[in-house]
Amino acid sequence: MSDAPPSDATAPAAGAQTPAAGPATPPETPVEAVLARRRSVRAFLPDPLPRADLERILRAARSAPSGANLQPGRFHVLTGAALDGLAAALVAAAESGRPPVAQYSYFPQPMPADLKDRQRAAGHALYAALGIARRDLAGRQAQFLRNYAFFSAPVGIVVTIRPDMGKGCFMDLGMSLMALMMAAEAMGHASCGIGALANHADVAHAHLGLGEDEMVVCGLALGRPDPDAPVNAVRTGRDALAQFATFRGFS
């Protein structure tokens, strides 16, 4: 390497001003890293989760923001025989062909065309990863039934809320669920929300012996992800920033 000073051709001209550098992009934060790698996992290893981990995860969930500190939502955590029994009851109900009995509306009715396209694209990616053809209705149904078996995860959670809570409390519960998933991901566990469980909410309600002050909202599968399962490679896209955010008053 030469020790010679830079030539006049590369040195700034006398009196010239060096352009001010723009603000440096801050490094990715640990929270952003967890958000970026979190995904819905539908294949798990059979390894049990320590109860101490689950208690930490649930405390993190309860730390989410809560309007008027109402702290909506309860979390019924099952594993082993308790989980197997609930899963068997839910699968049997789904296989019976009984109509859904959900106590709240999850999707808009009717579904707008642009949102329907997103739903179809997500489903296509999932079934393609599993090698299930578009016209393989039996294969698709078998995969959907895995929702009710909590995707064979070692831990299943049934999430409930008081039926008299307003829509804002569902928003607070959603933040609790996200906090739960983030805490699990940060600890090396994986999760998948199971909205389909609400289709047979009465079965879960009766099986768990819940009171009238609890309405089943959803389920959650929790465990170590199976790194060799193709289904766990599925990632759904997200809108570009300009599609969902506006900025006003900025220079």
Image (tube, helix red, strand yellow):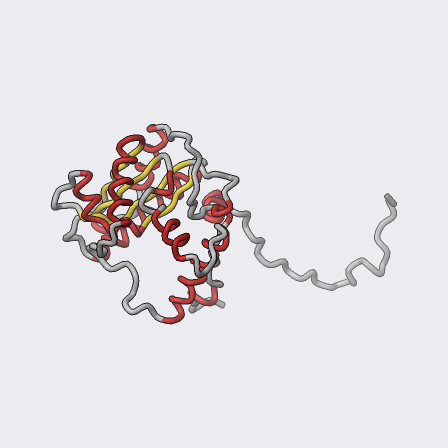
Please, which residue is most extreme toward the bottom here?
113
Task: Give the residue furthest to the left.
Answer: 212
- The residue positioned 29% from the left and 48% from the top of the image is 65
Question: In the picture provided, is 63 more to the left or to the right than 226?
Answer: left
Using the image, determine if residue 173 lies above or below residue 11: above
Confirm whether residue 48 shows in the render.
yes
Left or right of 55, for residue 240: right
Q: Residue 21: x, y in percent? A: 63, 58
Residue drawn at 18 percent across, 44 percent down: 205
Specify whether 227 is left or right of 149: right
Q: Is residue 50 above or below residue 198?
A: above
Give the position of the N terminus as an image quadrant.
Answer: top right
Q: Nearer the viewer, residue 146 or 224?
A: 146
Image x and y of residue 218, in percent: 28, 48
Q: Residue at x 36, y 34 (%)?
A: 154
Q: Considering depth in this image, is 111 or 149 the residue closer to the camera?
A: 149
Residue 246: quadrant of the picture: bottom left
Residue 104 location (% of width, % of height): 22, 57
- Quarter of the view holding residue 43: top left
- Whether residue 178 is visible: no
What percent of the width, then of the height, locates residue 89?
24, 41
* Badge count: 0
Write the residue at 31% across / 32% down.
Answer: 79
